[in-house]
Every structure is written in structure tokens, then in C-alpha cells.
């Protein structure tokens, strides 16, 4: 009987507390409640969530660009960019397209439904480093979702930043997200440029690709490449053209940021599903500067 | 390190002492087409079931500490409300009797990813901290290229390591627990003669390696040859079946699946080990696949093992056990792939 090896309970150990905390929190998710669901377009909805426990809600801190893993018991778990302001802590807003298993289930949920939130995970946009500089936000399609969080962060401290441009392109006018907020953004002195690929009869704005908007902006007299930060979110093909244009305009690669997306099953650098070559999108990303992306094989 | 000599007859006694715990060791599990026995790590109750002279096992021992299927947590649902119960599935210490150096090194490599911050994996760590490992010197097989990968000897990550000196074992004792167990059987300190004999045996073993891989500047080479036609040629051969990841001692990628109980009162979250060669490994909702071709998936596997891990931890993730090459239905082996990528012009 005394030949039994001692059982080491990793959680009961008096080892460094930090480690104990990390191990115990691996599978921990905050219980959150859907407080509101707004349909934005035919497929996308804005979900407002609140972490139920007030203490957890207050302590939930994230940076613009980070993501959370949203879990529905028995349905699955998936990563979503946070599109609300970091000042709102555990009162999160997620904009989600009904496209897969989990998101379809989510789209049928009503106010009051309970979901699990773990995170925040990943790297973020350097909104602190951007202080005093011009900000160029370029989004295509669903790319506006991760852009909204840095935009909010910038708008909440509007006077600390220089000129703010938001360029946003979508396929059709009906696909445009957050249309109800454009006016309020303009009031905060955001230069909003919106373009659609396939205009319909209701559309009176710009048409064509987002690169056209960008070319106009780059050609403008007050475009200062040395003091501009750019954040680009959208489909990979857009990254390539937009970043090439910006590089040509003289913007340093380490001041251009992109947010990549990959399949993820853990969000914690363990499942390897999100690897790009050798880099974890969940730990080293999802926000990368353009230099890193150029160095990554198969990134865009 | 403390060394000891134990007679061959002492080993069964050591086994019987350790058998108070669950013991996992190499056993014969059947025969292959030409009548040779096939080995696997399984739970052993009697010493004579152990096959300590096993050449290599088909599978690594990972299913005992990194199971192919594992329930991560369960949910109890009641109406709108639900609660999560987490269980790390580790309740008892496990003894691993007779692991080769490559498998011990594989554990050391896994520790770096799964047991380290940020987010150490408690499911793995709980089992890993409760392992008692007895390593065993091996005879190099034709498929082994561990010497090239620098994993032919284990320097840490075990409790006791035995080397066969014909009529006795030369033991390297690494943990206090192992030392205490050896107190209960008859051992003696090694003499100069034992040391010479040990060195002789090791030197003889080192000459038996027949397969070698040139890994000079491999990480750089893989970057240079990213577009090499060799990847395409191997990719065309690859069946994308994931067998290589199944038998690999260091493959840890996984997928998570959630299921609902039939009475809708509970749900479970299960982890399944996955393979980056399977077609939907990088497929996202909406149908976009980041690696749709078998060639890009195969290339990714090599990049992760030999380039990415190198970048992060200064060593390749591959331990050179050669199991993937033995198990591959298309006869793709690591030495062949790396040699063809290195070859001038990238021809396979």
C-alpha cells in the first residue's frame, strides 16, 4: 500500500499562485446574458451581452482588436471580435453574421438567453501609440466589426488624435453595417468615406472599390504619411491592394495594422487550428502589423 | 545524476512494487503481415506481459496522457440557465515502464507548449505531473533518425532510465521518488568496470543508426524552399488521412465538439485530437478553406514541426521516431521529404 505514488493535485498546490490561477481559469467562462439583439442587415445582427456577475463585469478589461470565445453549451464555441468600446468593460457588443452552426443558433436566440464568454484573447490595435497622429481606418464588408472598437476608443478621446478617416466598402448598400451610427461618427469629426460595389436605385454615394477612396485620400494635400497610423480589416484580397497603396504612399509597414481571422477551437494557443505557418493567430494575433504579415507565409 | 546497478532479477521486483499504481508499458498487440509482433503501450498487470526488448511501438504512448478523445467539461442545463462542470480527468498517478528516449523527449517538447504559460493546459498538466517514467535504452531501428534530431538520449523528463548491460541494468536516477523505490530492491553503486561497459554499450548503439537527416539550417532552408515543387509532388502522394498525426508522439492539435444529451438536460464538450492534413483543418464557417490543397497542408505540417517550433523554442518538434513514415499509407517519410526539399532545384 505504501508503494502508492503520491497523487499531485495541480490545483491544490501551494506552487506560485499565478500558475494555479492560470490552470484553474483555462476552461473558465463568464456567464453572460443577451440584453439586446439588433438586426443590422439580412444576415448580420448586433448582440449586446452583459456579463452577469457585476464584479466579473467590472474586471473584464480588453483592448480594441481583441476577441472573445463565445460558447453555447451543446452547440459550440467560436471566436468573435469585440466591437464595443473598451470603456464598457463587460457590457460587450458583438456583431455576428449568421453563417455557420453556432452563429445560426445564435441568430435565433432572444433577449435573456445565456451564453459563455471567455477571454479577452489576442493582440490589439495600438490606440495608445496612435495618440497625436492621424488615424486611417479602412474596412471592407464585415471588416467594420473589429474596426468599430478602435474607432470608439479614438472617438472617446477625440481631441488626442489628429485627423480620423474611416473608409468603408461593401458589396451592396443593403450590406452596410452600423448605418445608424454614421451621422454620430461624422459629428465627432470623422471623415467618413463609404463606397459600394453594386449600387441600387437607393444609393447616391460613391461606387467602386475602396482603393479608389484611398487613392483620393492619399493624393490629398493634407495626407501626412509620416504621422499616420492605418488599420485595415477586410477580406485578404483587400489587404493586399490597400497595403500596397499605403506602402507606396510612404506609410511605414509597422504603422499599418491588419486583423486576420482563422478557424479557432481554443483561443489559447493549444489547438493549432489558427496557425499561419508557425504563428498562432490567437496568441500572436489577430492584430498584426503589416511587416509581420509580409513575413508570414500564406497569411494573406 | 546518481547512478546505480541493478541485477536483471531485480527488475520484476521493482515492477511489483510499482504495480500498486497503474502501470503502462510496451506489450505485444498482435502480428503484422510477415508474422512480426506489433507493440503498443498499454496497461500492464504482470511483469512477464511487458516486452522490454520491443523495437518500437506503432502508436506513441500519448493516448495515456493526451487522449484522442477527452471530455473537457459537461453542462447541466435547466431552461435558460446552465452551469459548467470542469473535470481534468486525472485521478491517479501512472507509471510508464520502458519508454524510449524519443518518447521521453516528445514529452519534454509537449511540456513546452501545453504545460507553459500563457494558458497552460490543465488537462495535460494534471496527468503529466502524476507520471512516473522509467526510461529504457533502445536499439536503433531502420526508421529511427532521432540522432539527427538530437533526441536519441533523454537528459531530463524521466524518473529512472535503464540501460541493458547484458546481465544487469545501468540505472540513471533522476528523481527522489525513483531513488526511494530503488532502496526497496537490491542495487549497488557502479564500479569503473560498469562505467566502461556502459560507455561501450552506448557507443555500440550509436553506431547502429542507419537513417540520418541533414538538419543544418533547416529552418532557413524551409523558408527558402517555400515554393519548392517538391511540396507539390509530396502533396500529390499524400492521402490526407491524418495517420501520421495519429501515431506521432508530439502532434497535439485538436478540435472541439459539443454534444447535447438526449434529454436536453445536459451537454458535453469533447476534445478530439486532429490532424493538420485533414481537409477541413483550416476551414472556416462560410466554407472558405485556408489550406484547401493537400500539398499546402502537408507543407504546413513540416513547417510547424521543423520551422515554427524551432522559431519558438530553438528545437524542432519532431523527435525522429519515424512512426509517421512507418504508418503512412503513401510511404511519405520525414527523411525523404526533407532531403527532397534540400535537393538542388527542389526536385523530389
Image (cartoon, helix red, strand yellow):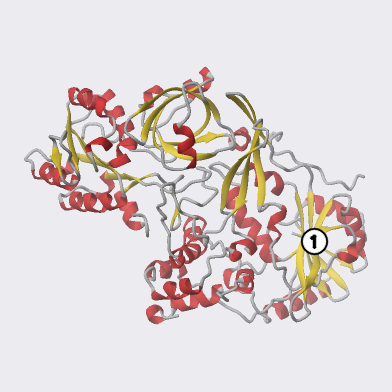
Q: How many numbered badges does the structure rendering display? A: 1
Q: Nearer the viewer, residue B279 or B322?
A: B279
Q: Nearer the viewer, residue B105 or A200?
A: A200
Picture layout, residue A36 above or below residue B45:
above
The quarter holding residue B268 reads: top right
Image quarter hosting the N terminus of chain B: bottom right
Q: Nearer the viewer, residue A10 or A186?
A: A186
* Label 1 packing within 10 angstroms: few (<14), some (14-19), many (20+): many
Q: Which residue is mark 1?
A: B25
| Residue B144 on image: x %, y % | 64, 74
The quarter holding residue A257 reads: top left
| Residue B341 on image: x %, y % | 44, 75
Residue at 55%, 43% (x, y): give it.
Answer: B117
Residue B135 seen from this side: no
| Residue B270 on image: x %, y % | 63, 44
| Residue A240 on image: x %, y % | 26, 53
Picture layout, residue B113 above or below residue A145:
below
Residue at 40%, 78% (x, y): give it.
Answer: B346
Q: Chain of mark 1?
A: B
Residue at 53%, 62% (x, y): give it.
Answer: B315
Dot 1 lies on which element?
Answer: strand
Amino acid at each position: 500500500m505504501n508503494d502508492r505514488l503520491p497523487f499531485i493535485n495541480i490545483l491544490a498546490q501551494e506552487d506560485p499562485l499565478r500558475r494555479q490561477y492560470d490552470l484553474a481559469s483555462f476552461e473558465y467562462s463568464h456567464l453572460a446574458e443577451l440584453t439586446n439583439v439588433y438586426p443590422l442587415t439580412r444576415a448580420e445582427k448586433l448582440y449586446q451581452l452583459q456579463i452577469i456577475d457585476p464584479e466579473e463585469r467590472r474586471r473584464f478589461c480588453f483592448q480594441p482588436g481583441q476577441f472573445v470565445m463565445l460558447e453555447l453549451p451543446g452547440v459550440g464555441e467560436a471566436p468573435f471580435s469585440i466591437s464595443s468600446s473598451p470603456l464598457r468593460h463587460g457590457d460587450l457588443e458583438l456583431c455576428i453574421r449568421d453563417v455557420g452552426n453556432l452563429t445560426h443558433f445564435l441568430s435565433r436566440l432572444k433577449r435573456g438567453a445565456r451564453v459563455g464568454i471567455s477571454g479577452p484573447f489576442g493582440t490589439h490595435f495600438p490606440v495608445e501609440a496612435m495618440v497625436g497622429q492621424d488615424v486611417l481606418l479602412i474596412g471592407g464588408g464585415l471588416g467594420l466589426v473589429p474596426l468599430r472598437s478602435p474607432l470608439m476608443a479614438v472617438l472617446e478621446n477625440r481631441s488626442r488624435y489628429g485627423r480620423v478617416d474611416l473608409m468603408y466598402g461593401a458589396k451592396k448598400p443593403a450590406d452596410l453595417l452600423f448605418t445608424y451610427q454614421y451621422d454620430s461618427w461624422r459629428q465627432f469629426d470623422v471623415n467618413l468615406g463609404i463606397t459600394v460595389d453594386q449600387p441600387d436605385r437607393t444609393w447616391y454615394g460613391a461606387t467602386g472599390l475602396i482603393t479608389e477612396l484611398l487613392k483620393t485620400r492619399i493624393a490629398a494635400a493634407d495626407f501626412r504619411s509620416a504621422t499616420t497610423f492605418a488599420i485595415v480589416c477586410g477580406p485578404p484580397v483587400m489587404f493586399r491592394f490597400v497595403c500596397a497603396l499605403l506602402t507606396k504612399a510612404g506609410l511605414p509597414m509597422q504603422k499599418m495594422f491588419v486583423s486576420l481571422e482563422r478557424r479557432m477551437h481554443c483561443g489559447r494557443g493549444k489547438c493549432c487550428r489558427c496557425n499561419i505557418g508557425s504563428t498562432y493567430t490567437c496568441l500572436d494575433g489577430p492584430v498584426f502589423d503589416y511587416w509581420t504579415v509580409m513575413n508570414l507565409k500564406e497569411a494573406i | 545524476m546518481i547512478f546505480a546497478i541493478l541485477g536483471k532479477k531485480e527488475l520484476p521486483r521493482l515492477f511489483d512494487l510499482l504495480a500498486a499504481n497503474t502501470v503502462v508499458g510496451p506489450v505485444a498487440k498482435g502480428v503484422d503481415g510477415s508474422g512480426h509482433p506489433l507493440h503498443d503501450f498499454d496497461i500492464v498487470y504482470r511483469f512477464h506481459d511487458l516486452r522490454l526488448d520491443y523495437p518500437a511501438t506503432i502508436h506513441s504512448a500519448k493516448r495515456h496522457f493526451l487522449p484522442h478523445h477527452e471530455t473537457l467539461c459537461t453542462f447541466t442545463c435547466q431552461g435558460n440557465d446552465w452551469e459548467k462542470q470542469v473535470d481534468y480527468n486525472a485521478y491517479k498517478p501512472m507509471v510508464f515502464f520502458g519508454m524510449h528516449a524519443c518518447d521521453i523527449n516528445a514529452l519534454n517538447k509537449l511540456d513546452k507548449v501545453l504545460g507553459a504559460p500563457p494558458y497552460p493546459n490543465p488537462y495535460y498538466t494534471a496527468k503529466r505531473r502524476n507520471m512516473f517514467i522509467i526510461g529504457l535504452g533502445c536499439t536503433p531501428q531502420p526508421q529511427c533518425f532521432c540522432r539527427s534530431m538530437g533526441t536519441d538520449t533523454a537528459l531530463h523528463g524521466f524518473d529512472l532510465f535503464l540501460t541493458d548491460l547484458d546481465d544487469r541494468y545501468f540505472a540513471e536516477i533522476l528523481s527522489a521518488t525513483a531513488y526511494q523505490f530503488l532502496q526497496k530492491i537490491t542495487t549497488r553503486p557502479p564500479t569503473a568496470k560498469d562505467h566502461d561497459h556502459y560507455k561501450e554499450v552506448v557507443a555500440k548503439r550509436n553506431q547502429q543508426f542507419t537513417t540520418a537527416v541533414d538538419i543544418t539550417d533547416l529552418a532557413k532552408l524551409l523558408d527558402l524552399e517555400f515554393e519548392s515543387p517538391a511540396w507539390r509532388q509530396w502533396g500529390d502522394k499524400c492521402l490526407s488521412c491524418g495517420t501520421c498525426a495519429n501515431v506521432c508522439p508530439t502532434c497535439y492539435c485538436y478540435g472541439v465538439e459539443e454534444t447535447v444529451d438526449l434529454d436536453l438536460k445536459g451537454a458535453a464538450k469533447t476534445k478530439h485530437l486532429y490532424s493538420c492534413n485533414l481537409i477541413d483543418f483550416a476551414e472556416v464557417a462560410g466554407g472558405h478553406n485556408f489550406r484547401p490543397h493537400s500539398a499546402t497542408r502537408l507543407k504546413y505540417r513540416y513547417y510547424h514541426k521543423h520551422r515554427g517550433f524551432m522559431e519558438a523554442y530553438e528545437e524542432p518538434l519532431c523527435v525522429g521516431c519515424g512512426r509517421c513514415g512507418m504508418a503512412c499509407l503513401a510511404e511519405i517519410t520525414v527523411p525523404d521529404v526533407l532531403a527532397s526539399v534540400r535537393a538542388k532545384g527542389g526536385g523530389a
